[in-house]
Image (cartoon, helix red, strand yellow):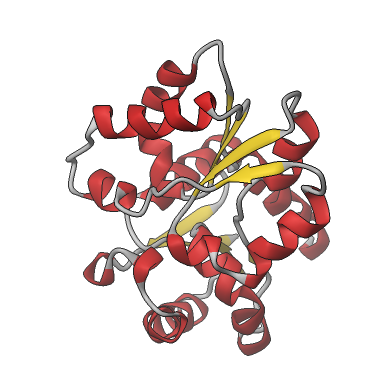
Amino acid sequence: MKIGVFDSGVGGLAVVQAIAKSMPELEIDYKDDKTHLPYGTKSIDEIYGYVKPIFKSFVADGCQIIVVACNTVTTNLIDCLRSEFEVPMVGIEPMVKPAAAATKSGIIAVCATPRTLSSQRYAWLKRQYAKGVKVLEPDCSDWATMVENNGVDRDKIAEIIDSVIARGADQIVLGCTHYHWIEQQINQIAAGRATVLQPEDAVVSQLKRVLAQLA
């Protein structure tokens, strides 16, 4: 079976690797949109204009499932895209639910793009799963660009991670697939003080469920 995987840039390649490792029998068509990076600071209308033709090309290329490996697109546009394209879609969104369930301090941090943090879907996740939990949302607006340009500033990352831990966060959610490529550094900075959550395993599990429904 052929599936499509989309992200704005290199972040989605981590999802591709996770899928390929778990389900090597799948043919994966990966598409990105580095021309318009970063998505996280663009308007929803702009992002929609960028992704619609890409999703059309997935369908034209025979993809039977599309994995939306971009938190910004998932949280803002997946309902619209699902209504337009009659292809099952697997989205990716900040892991607020498991973070809120696991916290001992009652404080979690969500590292994500401005557009993800301002989305209605993200607001719903907090209302639904983080009642009584304080959610910190540090400014990570330049992280995706740092990763894309191979210009990772470890000191800048450490400053943000240290600050949310100092404010009591014991769960740190990575809400952008680009952040996979700095996950190791974040884990080193947070070691022994906070748990870092990223959603690749959850996406693979959901993809397996959708594949089973199509079988």
Q: Would residue 196 appear left or right of 82 to someone viewing this image?
A: left
Vertical arrangement, residue 210 with respect to residue 174, above or below: below
Which of the 4 image quadrants contains residue 103?
A: top right
Residue at the extreme front:
167
Asked whether the viewer can see residue 3, the reply is no
Q: Position of residue 179 (x, y in %)?
A: 41, 41
Q: Would residue 174 appear left or right of 93 to someone viewing this image?
A: left
Q: Residue at x 44, y 57 (%)?
A: 113
Frontmost residue, 171 versus 82: 171
- State which quarter of the image contains the N terminus: bottom right
- State which quarter of the image contains the C terminus: bottom right
Q: Residue at x 52, y 48 (%)?
A: 137
Q: Residue at x 64, y 61 (%)?
A: 122
Q: Position of residue 76 (x, y in %)?
A: 57, 73
Q: Position of residue 194 (x, y in %)?
A: 58, 21
Frontmost residue, 76 versus 22: 76
